[in-house]
């Protein structure tokens, strides 16, 4: 029997269902199973759920459900969610132009890893990643599975502007900035495809639990895809595949 | 023409409703009104559903012209509303004629006022909400604050019933400058020492200048962590009190990130979020602890208070309030110098009662001084620029005159009410 999750109050309108306090694939799988169970069979009074690395945040309406009934409902869902891997069938493929103006920190990561820039790009693109959570800004995925050799620390001083599409590394995490914004991750490349579009359902290209792979592209191909995105000719289906990567 | 035209945007005016739920899993925050109770109240007074889109107006209100006859209501902070030059009371509905102009003379109590108009503002819903999320430029009117030249369409409203709706006087909140805010400890209170929790619950914290719709930052006694000041990122809520490495608390507000990597010592009780939303930089806050059950009881009571909104009794009930024409001034109103985008000096800008000094309406950092001593200035001319709440706010001359003493220089921090520049009669 897996250990029961801890349930903590995040104020009077949310609880945290906690399966651990570290970055741990098994704990994250349990988060995703409970998340899926609560989404597939909605319970009255639960407003929305937000999966994170090792906990699920459950927003509730205290005028519609008591704290006690909520906890009972969540523990039942956790018990029924089983131990099987509730793995997403989706693999999202993200084309990335590594280095140069697209990846201003690739050289630093190469120095950190004791590898050439090309070797870092190849190693990053060969990785098999799992989306642990989204957060920070709309559509920003936190990916686990970075080869440990590439786990360069964050910049000492964050940049005030990281261009949208930038692919970054922060310790053992890698992720993609969906839009321009400040950021301290080390930027190794950039993708031309949009990760967030509020006009689409779902708004985010990537969801928690998805698998992600990166494919290295040349700058010419980056420009070609970027042109199709601008012209509205790019489709999400081009990035979304089913089955294991 | 129909709807509402914007003649001046004010300090920060945005379209807000009750926010978007269901998108936090993708990193999209709740957004919506920071003072949700007041938004609901304004909507009910105007005859709308609670979740209709209204305006959130920050400290210095906009200048608006109604292009169609309508019914409207004001709530939240009292920003000194004037309809065609006559004071208009908040917390009760009022009728407006086509062409009527709504102005604001300056904040008397609180920071954020709300204006609901019958039908609600008709901007496109994005992810199920009309609220503005400024950081991502999403929702509201093109994802940005209102500015002069904008026109806000209205959804069609039910035929007005001619009744004046009001909130009974006993239910009208006052805000002041030293609110007590109740919190539920956790979810990571175990990340702090007993002394740290004692400092948080025993200290007085001053709202810092850098506060905005994303978060309320506080200065005060530092809160000691037991161990490292970071955790594996987890979900956050509107009201999470996170404490970073410097030991100072930040309360995440409606536009705050959906996840965060700092431990959260406590969470503000939902019933007290409106009062936190009404604190201005420089205000002093004390946090006290309540249990979850008590917080739920407070929230139920807050909703029951809203249910007291109804038609005003004909002939005037015992607690029928008379709105004072003469605002025998709070400090804030006195000190108001027009951070607003006044249109050709169209609305009056009070000045410090003492001397001829133009004073700071709230604490701020002087970014630049645009005039020199001895120089003649025209009404509405920019005297200097103050940085407050992450915005650069021009401070303008209230009337024609000659610049006398300049009390400040670029880089200087000023308190609310501090004299900035003397403008003597020419």
Image: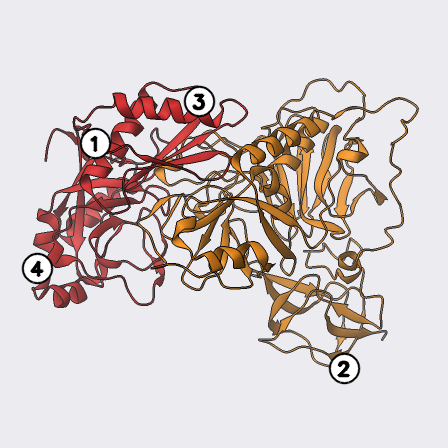
Chain colours: A red, B orange
Of circles 2 and 1, the one toward us is: 1
Circle 3 — which element? helix
For residue A22, above or below residue A83: below
Circle 1 — which element? loop
- Tell me the crowding category of disc 3: few under 14, some 14 to 19, or many 20 or more residues within 10 angstroms, Cα based: few
Q: Residue under label 3, please give it.
A: A69
Residue A77 rendering spot, x and y as whole percentages: 31, 22
Both on one chain, marks 3 and 2? Answer: no
Find out whether the residues at labels 3 and 1 contact each other: C-beta distance under 8 Å: no
Q: How many marks?
A: 4
Find out whether the residues at labels 2 and 4 contact each other: C-beta distance under 8 Å: no
For residue B157, above or below residue B369: above
Q: Residue furthest right?
A: B315
Q: Tell me the CA gap for discs 3 and 4.
A: 55 Å
Q: Which comes before the other along the chain, label 3 or label 1?
A: 1
Circle 4 — which element? helix
Of circles 2 and 4, the one toward us is: 4
Q: Which comes before the other along the chain, label 4 or label 1?
A: 1
Of circles 3 and 2, the one toward us is: 3
Q: Residue under label 4, please give it.
A: A118
Could you say which quadrant of the image residue B374 lies in? bottom right
Q: Tell me the CA gap for discs 2 and 1.
A: 78 Å
Residue B6 rendering spot, x and y as whole percentages: 66, 43
Both on one chain, marks 3 and 4? Answer: yes
């Amino acid at each position: 029997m897996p250990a029961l999750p801890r349930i903590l109050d995040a104020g009077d309108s949310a609880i945290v269902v906690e399966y651990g306090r570290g970055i741990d694939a098994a704990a994250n799988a349990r988060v995703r199973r409970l998340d899926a169970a609560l989404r597939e069979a909605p319970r009255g009074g639960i407003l929305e759920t937000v999966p994170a690395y090792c906990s699920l945040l459950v927003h509730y309406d205290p005028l519609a459900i008591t704290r006690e009934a909520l906890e009972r409902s969540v523990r039942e869902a956790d018990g029924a969610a089983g131990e099987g891997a509730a793995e997403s069938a989706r693999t999202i493929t993200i084309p990335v132009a590594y280095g140069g103006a697209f990846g201003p920190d690739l050289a630093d990561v190469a120095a950190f890893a004791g590898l050439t820039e090309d070797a870092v790009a190849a190693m990053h693109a060969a990785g098999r990643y799992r989306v642990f959570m989204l957060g920070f800004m709309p559509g920003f995925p936190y990916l686990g599975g970075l080869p440990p050799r590439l786990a360069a620390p964050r910049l000492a001083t964050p940049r005030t502007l990281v261009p949208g599409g930038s692919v970054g590394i922060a310790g053992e995490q890698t992720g993609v900035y969906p839009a321009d914004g400040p950021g301290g991750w080390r930027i190794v490349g950039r993708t031309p495809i949009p990760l967030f579009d509020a006009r689409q359902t779902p708004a985010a290209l990537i969801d928690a639990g998805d698998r992600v792979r990166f494919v290295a592209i040349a700058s010419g191909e980056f420009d070609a895809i970027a042109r199709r995105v601008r012209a509205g000719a790019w489709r999400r289906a081009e990035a979304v595949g089913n089955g294991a990567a | 023409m129909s709807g509402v035209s914007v003649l001046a945007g004010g300090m920060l005016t945005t379209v807000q409703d009750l926010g978007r739920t269901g998108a936090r899993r993708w990193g999209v925050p709740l957004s919506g009104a920071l003072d949700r109770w007041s938004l609901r109240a304004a909507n009910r007074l105007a005859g709308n559903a609670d979740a209709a889109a209204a305006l959130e107006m920050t400290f210095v209100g906009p200048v608006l012209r109604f292009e169609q006859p309508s019914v409207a209501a004001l709530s939240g902070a009292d920003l000194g509303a004037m309809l065609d030059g006559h004071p208009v009371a908040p917390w009760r509905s009022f009728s407006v004629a086509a062409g009527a102009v709504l102005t604001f003379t300056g904040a008397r109590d609180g920071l954020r006022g709300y204006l609901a108009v019958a039908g609600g503002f008709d901007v496109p819903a994005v992810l199920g909400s009309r609220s503005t999320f400024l950081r991502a430029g999403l929702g509201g009117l093109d994802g940005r604050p209102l500015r002069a030249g904008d026109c806000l369409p209205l959804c069609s409203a039910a035929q007005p019933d001619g009744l004046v709706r009001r909130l009974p006087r006993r239910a009208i909140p006052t805000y002041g400058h030293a609110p007590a805010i109740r919190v539920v400890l956790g979810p990571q209170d175990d990340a702090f020492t007993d002394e740290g929790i004692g400092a948080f619950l025993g200290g007085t914290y001053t709202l810092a200048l850098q506060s905005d719709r994303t978060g309320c930052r506080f200065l005060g006694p530092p809160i000691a962590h037991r161990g490292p000041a970071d955790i594996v990122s987890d979900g956050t809520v509107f009201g999470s009190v996170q404490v970073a490495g410097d030991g100072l608390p930040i309360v995440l507000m409606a536009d705050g990130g959906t996840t965060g990597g700092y431990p959260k010592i406590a969470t503000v009780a939902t019933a007290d979020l409106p009062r936190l939303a009404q604190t201005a930089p420089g205000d002093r806050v004390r946090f006290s602890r309540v249990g979850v059950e008590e917080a739920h009881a407070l929230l139920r009571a807050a909703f029951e208070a809203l249910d007291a909104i109804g038609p005003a009794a004909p002939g005037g009930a015992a607690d029928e309030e008379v709105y004072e024409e003469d605002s025998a001034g709070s400090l804030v109103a006195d000190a108001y110098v027009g951070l607003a985008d006044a249109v050709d000096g169209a609305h009056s800008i009070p000045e410090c009662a003492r001397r001829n000094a133009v004073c700071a309406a709230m604490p701020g950092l002087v970014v630049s001084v645009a005039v020199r001593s001895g120089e003649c200035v025209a009404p509405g001319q920019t005297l200097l620029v103050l940085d407050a709440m992450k915005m650069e706010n021009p401070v303008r001359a209230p009337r024609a005159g000659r610049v006398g003493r300049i009390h400040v220089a670029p880089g200087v921090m000023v308190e609310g009410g501090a004299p900035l520049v003397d403008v003597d009669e020419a």
